[in-house]
Amino acid sequence: MVKKNKAYAIRELLKQGMSVREIRARITVSEAYAYTIKKLMELEQEQEREQEAPPLELTEEMKEMAYDLTQGTGRPKPGEFIETGTSIGTVLDERGARYGNFITQARIAQQLKNVAHTFAMQQGKTFDVDQAEAIDMILSKLARILNGDPHYADNWIDIAGYAKLVADRLEGKIQ
């Protein structure tokens, strides 16, 4: 109950343009907690802007490229992997059925990562690059599980794989 009241007070003061440091001086609250509330407000505002955004206007060139790629007639650029005969729409439909709506999945992933990064920062924790990337990838996989098909084994296998890569490196078995 107290957190809700403090969170509400922090939100109101942020809306008035106060800085986190000013809020911390005014209310008995940690700077990290105030930053977390500020970040949540920013995410909410971003979500509102996304919902209000006008649809993307496609140029004729973009339409032609999309047509070529979906018909299997376009040439992928070096490094692109497009299966012959598979349209991007088909791939996106399959992924959507497996993982759920991408915007929702992305929101879940970003919120999980924000919580993890904020907590690590509060605790003064630092991570090696492989650890940080593994944490981010594991949280992305968790978001897919939460938003999509929790019975899809590949997500669980990927989570174990990222954890194993870090564990192996820590044990001197670099892959």
Image (cartoon, grey):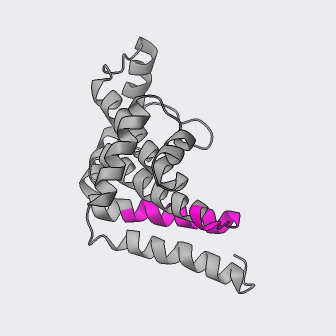
Position of the N terminus, as image quadrant, is: bottom left
Q: Main secondary structure of the magenta part?
A: helix
Q: Position of residue 34 (x, y in %)?
A: 47, 49
Relative to 21, 175 lies left or right = right
The residue at the point 24 percent across, 54 percent down is 97
**113 in the magenta segment:** no
Position of the C terminus, as image quadrant, is: bottom right
Q: What span is colored magenta in the figure?
A: 122-142
Quarter residue 149 falls in: bottom left
The residue at the point 70 percent across, 67 percent down is 128
Q: Position of residue 135 (x, y in %)?
A: 54, 66
The residue at the point 39 percent across, 70 percent down is 154
* Residue sitting at the far top: 60
Relative to 141, 129 lies left or right = right
* Residue sitting at the far bottom: 171
Compared to 55, does 156 lie above or below? Answer: below
Relative to 121, 114 lies left or right = left
Relative to 143, 120 lies left or right = right
